[in-house]
Amino acid sequence: MLDRILYRLYYIDMVDSENAGNEIGVQLGQDQPAYKAVGEHFERLINSGRLQPGDRLPTVRLLAERTGLNKATIVQGFSELRRRGLVTSRPGRGTIVAASPSAQSVPVADRIQSLYRHLLPEPGWGSELPEYDFSALWPAPSMFPLDAFRRIHEKLMRGRPELLQYGSAQGYHPLREYLEERARRIGIGSGQAVVVQGSQQGLDLIFRTFLNPGDAVAVESPTYAGILPELALHEARVLAVPMETDGLDVASLQSLIRNERIKLLYFMPNFQNPTGITMSEEKRNALARLAAATGTLLVEDDFEHDLRFSGRERRPVAGRMGSANVIYLSTFSKTLLPGLRMGWMIAPAALAEPLVLAKQYTDIHTSVLTQAAVNEFCRSGQYDRHLVRLRREYRKRLDGARRTLALHMPDGSIWTEPDGGFSLWVTLPEGYDSSVLSSEAVSRGVHLWPGSRFYPGGRGGERSFRLSLSLASEQEIAAGIAILGKLLRVRRAARRARANDARNILFL
Amino acid sequence: MLDRILYRLYYIDMVDSENAGNEIGVQLGQDQPAYKAVGEHFERLINSGRLQPGDRLPTVRLLAERTGLNKATIVQGFSELRRRGLVTSRPGRGTIVAASPSAQSVPVADRIQSLYRHLLPEPGWGSELPEYDFSALWPAPSMFPLDAFRRIHEKLMRGRPELLQYGSAQGYHPLREYLEERARRIGIGSGQAVVVQGSQQGLDLIFRTFLNPGDAVAVESPTYAGILPELALHEARVLAVPMETDGLDVASLQSLIRNERIKLLYFMPNFQNPTGITMSEEKRNALARLAAATGTLLVEDDFEHDLRFSGRERRPVAGRMGSANVIYLSTFSKTLLPGLRMGWMIAPAALAEPLVLAKQYTDIHTSVLTQAAVNEFCRSGQYDRHLVRLRREYRKRLDGARRTLALHMPDGSIWTEPDGGFSLWVTLPEGYDSSVLSSEAVSRGVHLWPGSRFYPGGRGGERSFRLSLSLASEQEIAAGIAILGKLLRVRRAARRARANDARNILFL
């Protein structure tokens, strides 16, 4: 249960009413009665739009547990909100945000806030934890190599104070060497490793260093949802390049480039997020040629490279044609322990240099101890053995999901067959809507991300959704997909009924 | 010895020829002979200005050790550089950068690079490790609580996978609570904790969130050297507010504010870096009033708050007069383990909110495991006991340094008497130059930072220098200061001799 709560902390505490407890805790002790803190907390969430009309507030019991306040205090806080018309209570449904909350706006610094709306939980994801969580692209905690890391820490923290002293901005040297060696093994002939706080920081450093406001940036469509607000924040103009079944549509990218200067292309070569698609050899070569010819900076986010369980391993674009302007980016977040925040880039020296300086002024460097621990895990061979286990497990889950999808999805549905990773992408036939499915599924305990989240401007993916299979067991995957199937059948039946009604009307 | 090398990695690997080994290692295996990699590495350092004419290259022996290359390879690399006129060899002095290196410029992205010149090692800090290192503001590694942290990790990594999963952007909740409670104890009545990767990231997030290009930012003069390039990067206009013996000159700040809108003031209330000065009660109140009246955002960097060993503890400015626009910033880097990269802010909710979002897109969050470990160390009472030991140790070192300064500094020298921290600020009498002292000291194995480093625009501090006492033992502190005294006496004698010569000439 605690795990489940913690999973849901992703994107984030301050946007998730489930975490109200934390926020309220913060406000206590500030010369006001506790019930007022409760009321003010939810008022803030409502006024800022994080809680929308119709959303359910957490239960009194849950809040009491999380805050340590007694239930009477919370009930009193809710009464205050009710008195002021901000919420209503409905028997059996709990406390609900009222239709027209007073629109007093909360002073916040700037545009950052609105951009991140994008990453809020789906409407209706309220205080209840999903029974079947197919939403976040988080690795399976049951597979975390905790014992190995405990032993490594035990070893590293004996008499090596230098691992706890200030360190290098570029990264802990033995780990950099390991990463560069690994890069060479997968076909990236040269380049310097730069260690970062997860690939998110890599992206942020790249954008800070190389983008100016107004620059055109091309992304796959659909793409990683987190990059869209990030690019908006850097005031980039985002251009969408459609995905095809063998990777992004290179012809479409070429025609974009003919029309204007594209400063940067962000793409994922393997098990693309959200589609799971792997880019073909031909397209990889075409991208490498394009980058060399046009000077467009390629950012190759190979976030699940090590999770391939079928198909042939393909050399990264960064390993082709000299690739003087390709930055290769990867992470240990999907294969190891995301809480460690460990990612890395491999960049040509001329690009690595300013990135290291940007890293330096951003946070001086990444934890030396953590880098040393990951280095130890990798060099001892444990990482490679761990990957074997992960690939076996995720393959099993994806196979299971595909079998269940075949049983339950409407005729005409299609889904991708990724060669790695732990998610797949389902597209329903004409007439279905994945946002509707997503919000109906919530009440049945199933969470998933509808397709539109992954499209620049939210345009596209209306019939698609991503299923992430890492937080559910095989049984849960089967049961959750069966629920989705049932919801879709009910909807189809309703539509048939309506169609019949319509026909009857026509023939009246 | 390894420790010493690692200490010097601060500001940083890529700017320090001592670390040439790492850089060269990176470039090997890239289809070129090893000696070429050696040559090209130094060529790059020379062309980029990191190595200046007259600088000494590391010895062949040291490079061989660091790179694992054989000496012949390195000698051949150096020959190549000599052949091309980039370096010269002088008997007994090793290999020296030539007076007019070919000025081929290295392609780098942008202005980031030149800004960081500021933080390069002093000229002449070459391949040799200092015997007496008074330069960096790094805590004493002999005091690191390694065993305690090892035990804590041992405990945390048993069956708590949630500490290794994705976490909250604002920070690990129990740690946030602890920090907020601690803030209340030192007089900050309200505000939310935001956990960051060391206070450097705190500064970066604040600037990203609240500064626009061209905004006026006031800093103490002298101030933390690292903030100057950081502000330049954010295109802030930096305004200097002189330091007085009881904190920054509030009248001077007021007159700046009368002339233009100051967006932000950055200051250090306790044991200010570099002077060691603590701000008086009156000035703290004046700043709080000023902030309330003018809307200037105050950034109160209390980086060594917990290291007070004498004098009365004073409430932070953030704890006065409501302080709706004061962000309090602190760090575990000086008191605990800088390698962990753990800092925090306490900010009013309206300011914390956009900062948390900025943190989110920067790197999602700080390592949960590390936060949990620090939380455990603090809540178990070990942190407070650790502070008692630190204060005792640093007081002893500062007392020792002051006694030795009194014996060896020229008449008319003054130095600060900080109530905490581990550095002090020495000002020599008229006619002395701390940059000259610094470069003369290098050859005697003593490293220190001359005063001009800490002044906006490098203007000021010509007779001052900072002595950081954390990396040297009491004996080394005494011996190092004695060497400085001797250098200063020689210089004074030379000046007297010149003065006599001049007099003789006058009377000829």
Image: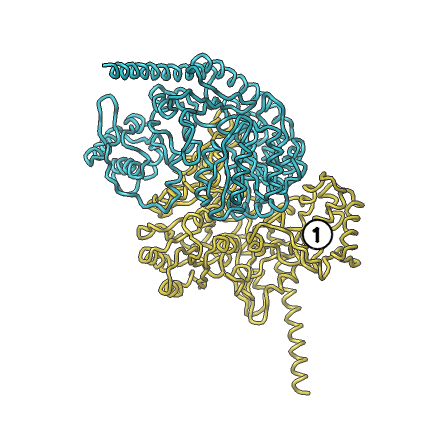
Chain colours: A yellow, B cyan
Q: Position of residue B318 (x, y in %)?
A: 62, 36
Outermost top residue: B407
Outermost left residue: B83
* Residue B150 shows in this picture: no
Left or right? Give the position of A349 relative to A340: left
Q: Which residue sits at x=24%, y=36%? A: B101
Location of residue A445 by image quarter: bottom right
Quadrant occupied by the N terminus of chain B:
top left
In the picture shown, does residue A19 fall above or below B276?
below
Outermost bottom residue: A508
Quadrant occupied by the C terminus of chain B:
top left
In the picture shown, does residue B287 fall above or below A205?
above
Q: Position of residue A269 (x, y in %)?
A: 42, 55
Q: Position of residue A397 (x, y in %)?
A: 55, 53
Query: How many marks on residues?
Result: 1
What type is the residue that disc 1 sits on? Glu
Write down the chain letter for disc 1: A
In the picture shown, does residue A200 fall above or below A437?
above
- Local crowd size for mark 1, using a 10 Å CA cut-off: few (<14), some (14–19), many (≥20): many
Left or right? Give the position of A304 relative to A298: right
Q: Position of residue B109 (x, y in %)?
A: 36, 47
Q: Nearer the viewer, residue B367 or B219?
A: B219
* Residue A97 shows in this picture: yes
Label 1 sits on residue = A43
Under circle 1, the secondary element is: helix
